[in-house]
Amino acid sequence: MRLIDGKIRVMREELKKDTDEIRESYDFGTFVSNFTYHPHNETQNPHYHFCTMEAIHVLAGSVEAGYGNNWRTVNERQSVLFGLGERHNLRTREVTKSLDFPAATANIAAVHMAYKWIPPFLDLDESDTQLLLKSDWWHADCDSLKIYDAA
């Protein structure tokens, strides 16, 4: 048995963005989970993943998941799964009810878990998996991977 400590992430500091979003992240080696307090009327950064799968599980409130003109409401006890390379992000609207979660202040519209993992068919060792879990995030405006010559 191995005990995993969570890491509190204040997204205002991490993203240099005007947000009250707080995440608690857990790194399990080949799997990462983020517990997120999502403030009302906020849209996260649109992005996609080349090699990691991502699922969002709404624990309280609701979020809208999607990209461009294709948005779906994800309510409590629902999840959404994003495929490899699928552009997506999350947004919230107004607070519709008081959330019964520790640290959920009046401006929190949703509490959700994000799960990221490497699909088993990629058959990677743990160090490669760690590298991908930490770096497989691309802003949705990025159409291709570009490698720049430092010279």
Image: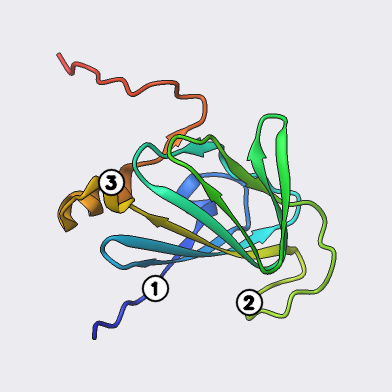
Q: Position of residue 130 (x, y in %)?
A: 24, 54
User: Tag 1's secondary structure?
Assistant: loop
Tell me the mark number nearer the camera, choosing from 2 and 3: 3
Under tag 3, what secondary structure? Answer: helix
- Label whose residue precedes the other's in the sequence (2 or 3): 2
| Number of other residues with Cα within 10 Å of mark 2, as a class: few under 14, some 14 to 19, many 20 or more | few
Q: Position of residue 89 (x, y in %)?
A: 59, 42
Q: Are marks 1 and 3 in contact (CB under 8 Å)?
A: no
Q: From the image, tell me which residue sits under label 2.
A: 103
Disc 1 crowd rating (10 Å Cα; few below 14, some 14-19, many 20+) is some
Residue found 29% across the figure and 83% down from its top: 3
Q: Residue furthest top?
A: 151
Residue 93 x %, y %: 79, 51
Cα–Cα span, label 1 and label 3: 19 Å
What label sits on residue 6 in the rendered view?
1
Gap between marks 2 and 1 measured at Cα: 15 Å
Instruction: Check residue 132 in the rendering and tell me which mark sits there, or answer none.
Output: 3
Q: Residue at x 43, y 64 (%)?
A: 33
Mark 2 to mark 3: distance in Å?
31 Å
Q: Looking at the image, is mark 2 or mark 1 earlier in the sequence?
A: 1
Say if 101 sits above or below 85 in the image.
below
